[in-house]
């Protein structure tokens, strides 16, 4: 099944919610972040981004995340104050954990439920 991404914005809490379905390749992930950074974040004032992968099959290898690292680092000024929560099941949590460990300057955290992700994003540091 082809990758699809649904974008919703919670105006009250200033959270962009991205919901993935289908099979995700690195190109899908990269294009969704490009759209988020260059289009969605210019439209909305975001305190956080919640990305839900629970309905998706992530087909990305660990060595492929370097292109995402470059995109994040190139857009550090845009992303540094935004909490980024990723919802995924425990078998797919390795990619966000590896990224977080390698780049602690970003506020990225994996979760297994929307409620936990939402609570973290809306809580002040």
Image: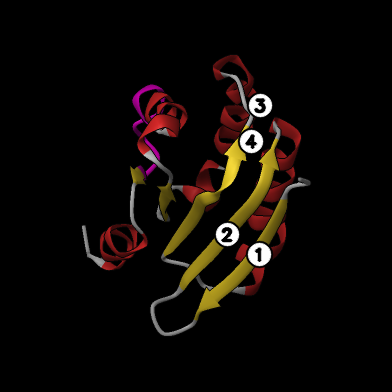
Q: Is residue 95 magenta?
A: no
The answer for how far apart the CA atoms under marks 4 and 2 are is: 20 Å
Q: Are marks 3 and 2 in contact (CB under 8 Å)?
A: no
The answer for how far apart the CA atoms under marks 1 and 4 are is: 21 Å
Q: Nearer the viewer, mark 3 or mark 2?
A: 2
Q: Is residue 106 magenta?
A: yes
Q: Which residue is mark 3?
A: 67
On the rendered image, what quadrant is the C terminus found in?
bottom left
- Which x, y percent locates residue 78? 54, 52
- Depth check: 46 or 30 in front? 30
Q: Which residue is mark 1?
A: 6
On the rendered image, what quadrant is the N terminus found in?
top right
- Which x, y percent locates residue 6? 66, 64
Q: Earlier in the sequence, mark 1 or mark 3?
A: 1
Packing grade of label 1 (10 A; few <14, some 14-19, many >=20) is: few
- Against 6, is 60 above or below? above
- Against 103, is 50 above or below? below
- Numbered label attached to residue 19: 2
Task: Please state if 3 lies on the left or on the right of 61 as rendered.
Answer: right
Q: Secondary structure at mark 4?
A: helix
Q: Secondary structure at mark 3?
A: helix
Q: Are marks 2 and 1 in contact (CB under 8 Å)?
A: yes
Tell how many labels. Answer: 4
- Numbered label attached to residue 71: 4
The answer for how far apart the CA atoms under marks 3 and 2 are is: 21 Å
Q: Earlier in the sequence, mark 4 or mark 2?
A: 2
- Against 12, is 62 above or below? above
């Amino acid at each position: 099944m082809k990758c699809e991404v649904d974008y919703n914005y919670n105006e009250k809490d200033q959270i962009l919610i991205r919901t993935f379905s289908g099979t995700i390749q690195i190109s899908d992930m990269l294009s969704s972040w490009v759209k988020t950074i260059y289009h969605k974040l210019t439209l909305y004032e975001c305190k956080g981004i919640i990305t839900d992968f629970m309905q998706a099959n992530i087909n990305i290898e660990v060595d492929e995340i370097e292109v995402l690292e470059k995109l994040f680092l190139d857009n550090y000024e845009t992303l540094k104050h935004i909490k980024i929560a990723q919802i995924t099941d425990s078998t797919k949590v390795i990619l966000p954990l590896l990224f977080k460990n390698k780049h602690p300057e970003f506020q990225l955290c994996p979760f297994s439920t929307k409620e936990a992700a939402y609570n973290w994003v809306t809580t002040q540091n």
